């Protein structure tokens, strides 16, 4: 514990060098900028900005990513409140009450409670991350390959079935992701899979290409397919972006409750920020003295979910850093960012790259603080971004996404892949299939195979090893609950309706 | 099991689900044809792909059954029960053409031309009707991106026609 504290101080020293501080500042700015733009969530924001950091040293680049990560979250809430087009699933709930508040002329208070709540939640959650992640990494050192495989399968099940409205569609998305993950040469034998004799495909499909294409191109094509000439309306901010004492009194408890809900649900693989923000909203609605305000612009309905969203974002980093297992699309991109510098997150990270990981955690604190002091005063500048006509916006996003896909390897093949994945993204949206399970499949599929093979190599081919020992049994027990629980619930509901 | 009459929306989704099922079958077929360079590992490189293939075709099949029973997917951004939005094919074709143009033009004509074509085309597709103003904005966008990446970040982009003029005397 004391050791961690010393390491964190070292991290602050790393983060406070002028160069790194500048990259942190640039990251908060770029993250907010891209996050504010409607239709761009944090995952796409980081994916789009990935090529920019390719020429920077790893520590500075990852510090910038940490700042982009939090910045994109802040930016997203601004858009939800003022434009009612949430850029990511975690801000959907914010739009619910936040946009109503803005319509009632209380945009300033909504923005302020979102920003301060995000800061409070982000700071507490980052503190929990700083002490939780090393502890988890230490525990993880004892996990055998079979245990890892069990964890990945649990992540597949939760991400696949908890997201979106239809469980089967989540699993469909996961299976397509797993298939994409297969493409290329098998790591151990070099055997080629699904490459169709194309030399470019031997190294597999770039994850960043998949992310950028499925979010940016898929979304552009989907919006094109439903295009009508009705422009979205940006609501004005009257007065200062600040809140009254009464607003503050109504907000602080939801902030803390949101943090308490968001962080743990990020650490366990519960599939991104949709579930915690929804839960937080439900809790605030149930506890509020002003229940009748919900649905018409209740400040608690912005404060709680926004805090939950940010705490969740920090929570997701715990298994990402300590186990190397991303459980949200955004964490998946951060993992890719690490990998692009040949750094593999996982239990060894805190020992092999202490400077980078503690510098990153320290810069999360700094970024969080910078966002608070920069964003509320700059709010009018961010609002200008929302007034960009949507045709230029989508033109810019599309062109920049194609650039991102190309610039990674200077490869036209990647562009063709991006086009195909973009079409897939369109079909997914059209038929109500969630996107995140696909990304988790692409990233964790190859990892699942790796641990699967390692486990069976240890046991000389005896499949019993996969469920041997206490840890895998516990995880598979949880898996059973995740699958059976909702089925029992549905059955009970149906039964009750029939009666 | 009660199968319901399939609506027009259901037909499209059924085709989508069918192709996902076939994707699983296809992965199994591709795996069976796999060339295995050396066979000294305990676990064949085919085992995991077969598992993925089985999973993919199984969930594909489950989706088909789901649709046949009348459980259609809810398009992104719609609420369950919303009326079905018909496709705006015209906009879609323009936007996909613009994206495809970028891919084709990049190596032939260079980044700047490709980016101008793509930006202009997508803007037009999304309803902008000021072709000259758009051309100006596209050009400025393409030039800023090109120079920011090639000069600022040292990331190479195809210069195309402008080779020599823009390549900084290299």
Image (cartoon, coloured by chain):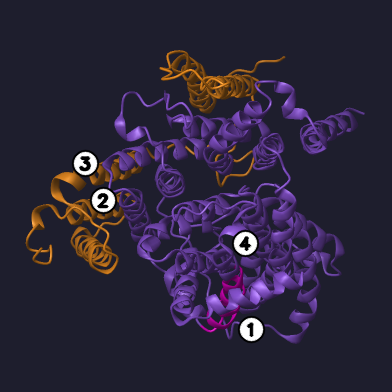
Chain colours: A purple, B orange
Q: CA distance from mark 3 to mark 4?
A: 39 Å
Please give the residue where the numbered disc 1 appears in the rendered image: A242
Q: Which of the two discs, 2 and 3, sits closer to the camera?
A: 3
Quadrant in the picture for residue B149: bottom left
Q: CA distance from mark 2 to mark 3?
A: 11 Å
Q: Residue furthest right?
A: A499
Q: Which of the two discs, 2 and 4, sits closer to the camera?
A: 2
Q: CA distance from mark 1 to mark 4?
A: 18 Å
Which badge, 1 or 4, is on the more N-terminal residue?
4
Seen at 19% across and 57% down, the residue is B112
Please give the residue where the numbered disc 2 appears in the rendered image: B118
Q: Find out whether the residues at labels 2 and 1 contact each other: C-beta distance under 8 Å.
A: no
Indicate the secondary structure of the residue bearing disc 1: loop
Instruction: Same chain for labels 2 and 4? Say yes or no.
Output: no
Q: CA distance from mark 2 to mark 4?
A: 32 Å
Q: Find out whether the residues at labels 1 and 4 contact each other: C-beta distance under 8 Å.
A: no
Q: CA distance from mark 1 to mark 3?
A: 50 Å
Residues rendered magenta in the picture: A361-377
Indicate the secondary structure of the residue bearing disc 3: helix
Q: CA distance from mark 2 to mark 1?
A: 41 Å
Identify the mark at residue B104; answer none if there is no mark. Answer: 3
Horizontal and vertical percent position of residue B147: 22, 66
Seen at 55% across and 39% down, the residue is B75
Can residue A183 be seen here? yes
Q: Is residue B43 left or right of residue A45?
A: right
Nearer-the-camera pick, A203 or A348? A348
Q: Find out whether the residues at labels 1 and 3 contact each other: C-beta distance under 8 Å.
A: no
Check the residue under mark 1 and report the chain it is in: A
Indicate the secondary structure of the residue bearing disc 2: helix
Q: Find out whether the residues at labels 2 and 3 contact each other: C-beta distance under 8 Å.
A: no
């Amino acid at each position: 514990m004391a050791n961690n504290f010393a390491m964190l101080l070292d991290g602050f020293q790393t983060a406070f060098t002028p160069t790194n501080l500048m990259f942190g500042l640039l990251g908060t700015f770029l993250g907010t900028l891209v996050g504010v733009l409607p239709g761009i969530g944090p995952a796409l924001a980081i994916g789009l900005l990935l090529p920019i950091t390719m020429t920077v040293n790893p520590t500075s680049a990852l510090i910038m990513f940490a700042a982009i990560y939090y910045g994109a979250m802040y930016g997203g809430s601004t858009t939800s409140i003022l434009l009612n087009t949430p850029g990511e699933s975690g801000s959907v709930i914010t739009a619910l009450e936040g946009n109503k508040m803005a319509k009632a002329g209380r945009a300033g208070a909504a923005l302020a409670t979102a920003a301060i709540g995000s800061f409070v939640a982000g700071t507490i959650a980052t503190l929990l991350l700083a002490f939780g992640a090393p502890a988890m990494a230490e525990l993880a050192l004892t996990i055998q390959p079979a245990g890892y495989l069990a964890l990945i399968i649990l992540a597949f099940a939760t991400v696949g079935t908890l997201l979106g409205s239809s469980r089967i569609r989540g699993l469909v998305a996961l299976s397509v992701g797993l298939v994409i993950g297969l493409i290329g040469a098998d790591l151990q034998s070099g055997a080629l899979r699904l490459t169709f004799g194309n030399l470019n495909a031997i190294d597999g499909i770039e994850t960043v290409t998949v992310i950028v294409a499925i979010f940016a191109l898929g979304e552009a094509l989907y919006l094109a397919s439903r295009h009508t000439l009705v422009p979205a309306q940006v609501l004005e901010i009257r007065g200062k972006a600040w809140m009254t004492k009464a607003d503050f009194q109504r907000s602080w408890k939801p902030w803390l409750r949101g943090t308490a809900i968001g962080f743990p649900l990020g650490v366990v693989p519960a599939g991104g920020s949709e579930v915690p923000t929804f839960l937080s909203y439900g809790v605030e609605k149930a506890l509020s003295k002003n229940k009748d305000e919900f649905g018409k612009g209740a400040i608690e309905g912005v404060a709680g979910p926004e805090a939950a969203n940010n705490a969740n974002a920090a929570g997701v980093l715990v298994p990402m850093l300590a186990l190397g297992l991303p459980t949200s699309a955004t964490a998946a991109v951060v993992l890719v960012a690490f990998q692009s510098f040949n750094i593999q997150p996982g239990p060894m990270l805190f020992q092999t790259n202490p400077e980078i990981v503690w510098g990153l955690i320290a810069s999360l604190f700094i970024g969080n603080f910078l966002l608070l002091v920069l964003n509320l005063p700059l709010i009018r500048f961010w609002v200008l971004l929302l007034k960009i006509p949507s045709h230029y916006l989508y033109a810019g996003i599309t062109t920049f996404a194609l650039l991102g896909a190309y610039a990674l390897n200077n490869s036209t093949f990647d562009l063709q892949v991006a086009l195909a994945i973009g079409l897939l993204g369109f079909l997914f949206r059209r038929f109500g299939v969630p996107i995140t399970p696909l990304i988790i499949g692409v990233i964790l599929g190859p990892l699942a195979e790796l641990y699967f093979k390692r486990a069976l190599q240890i046991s000389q081919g005896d499949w019993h090893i996969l469920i041997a020992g206490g840890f895998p049994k516990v995880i598979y027990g949880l898996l059973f609950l995740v699958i059976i629980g909702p089925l029992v619930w549905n059955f009970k509901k149906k039964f009750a309706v029939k009666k | 099991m009660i199968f319901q009459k399939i609506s027009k929306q259901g037909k499209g989704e059924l085709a989508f689900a069918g192709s996902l099922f076939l994707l699983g079958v296809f992965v199994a077929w591709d795996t069976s044809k796999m060339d295995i360079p050396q066979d000294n590992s305990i676990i064949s490189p085919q085992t995991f792909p077969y598992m993925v293939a089985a999973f993919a075709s199984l969930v594909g099949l489950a989706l088909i059954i789901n649709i046949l029973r009348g459980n259609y997917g809810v398009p992104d951004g719609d609420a369950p029960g919303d009326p079905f939005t018909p496709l705006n094919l015209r906009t879609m074709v323009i936007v996909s053409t613009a994206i495809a143009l970028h891919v084709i033009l990049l190596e032939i004509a260079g980044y700047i031309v490709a980016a101008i074509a793509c930006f202009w085309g997508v803007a037009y597709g999304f309803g902008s009707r000021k072709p000259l103003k758009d051309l100006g904005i596209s050009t400025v966008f393409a030039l800023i991106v090109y120079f920011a990446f090639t000069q600022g970040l040292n990331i190479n982009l195809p210069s195309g026609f402008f080779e020599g003029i823009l390549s900084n005397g290299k």
